[in-house]
Image (spheres, rainbow, N blue to C red):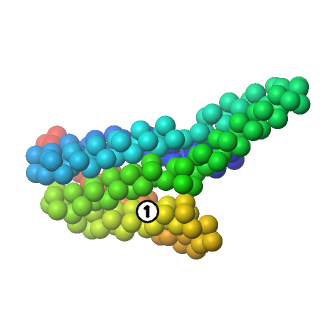
Amino acid sequence: MGMRYMGLMNILASTLMIPVFISLYGVHRKTNGLFAFFALITSLISYAIFMSDNVAFSILELSRKYSLSNMDNEKMMIVSATEALFARGASHTPGTFPGFFIGELGSILFCIVLIIGNIFKKKTGIVGLIAFTFLLLFEIISSFINSLSIQALIFALIGGISAIIWYILIGIELIKISKRKEN
C-alpha cells in the first residue's frame, strides 16, 4: 500500500507511455513535426522530473532497514528520514506537482497535435484533451487546496476514465496505422 500511495502506479503508467509518445511523434513528424517534437520533449522532461521527485523506492528501502533494525535510536532515525521523504514527495502534493503538471501539459499538447494533425480521429484528441485537463485540475486542487481534496476526486474520476478511453483509442489507431504501413 505504501508503494501505491507513493505513486507506483504512476511510475508504471509514465514508463509505459514513453513508447506511445515516441510513436505519436513518429506518426506526426512529417505533418506537424515541430509541435509534435515539442510535445514529446515536454513529456520526456516531465517523466524525468517525476522520476527524480518520486521517493517510493527510497521509502521502500527505508522500510526494509526499519524491519531489520533492532535498535530504537536507529529506528527513530529511519522514521525521521521517512517523514522527510513523505513531506517532499507523497503523491499529489506540492512536492510532486511539477512532474505531474508538466506531464499533463505534455499530454494536452499531444492531444492538440492529434486534433490538428488529421491523422487520428479528432474525437481521440478531444477525449484526451478532456482527460488531461480534468487530471490537471485534480493535480492543482489535490496539491494546493487540501480543503477540496474530496471534491477533487470527481475531477480524477472523470479524467481517469477519459484517459483510459484515450489510451484505448490511441492504441487502436496506432495499430491501424501500423497495418496500413505494412500493406
Residue 95 in view (yes/no) = yes
Identity, as a three-letter code, of the amino acid under mark 1 = Leu
Residue 179 in view (yes/no) = no
Nearer to us in this view, 166 or 149: 149
Density class for disc 1 (Cα within 10 Å; few <14, some 14-19, many ≥20) is many
Residue at 15% in and 48% down: 34
Residue at 28% in and 43% down: 41
Q: Left of 108 or right of it: where is 3?
A: right
Quadrant containing the C terminus is: top left
Q: Left of 18 or right of it: where is 74?
A: right
Q: Name the residue under label 1.
A: 136
Nearer to us in this view, 72 or 168: 72
Residue at 82% in and 35% down: 76
The percent coordinates of residue 171 (x first, y second) are 33, 51
Q: Left of 135 or right of it: where is 84?
A: right
The percent coordinates of residue 38 (x first, y second) are 23, 48
Residue 5 to residue 121: above or below: above
Q: Left of 74 or right of it: where is 40?
A: left
Question: Which image quadrant is residue 109 in?
Answer: bottom left
The percent coordinates of residue 57 (x first, y second) are 61, 34
Residue 122 to residue 175: above or below: below
Question: Which image quadrant is residue 8 in?
Answer: top right
SS label for mark 1:
helix
The percent coordinates of residue 122 (x first, y second) are 22, 66
Residue at 55% in and 60% down: 143
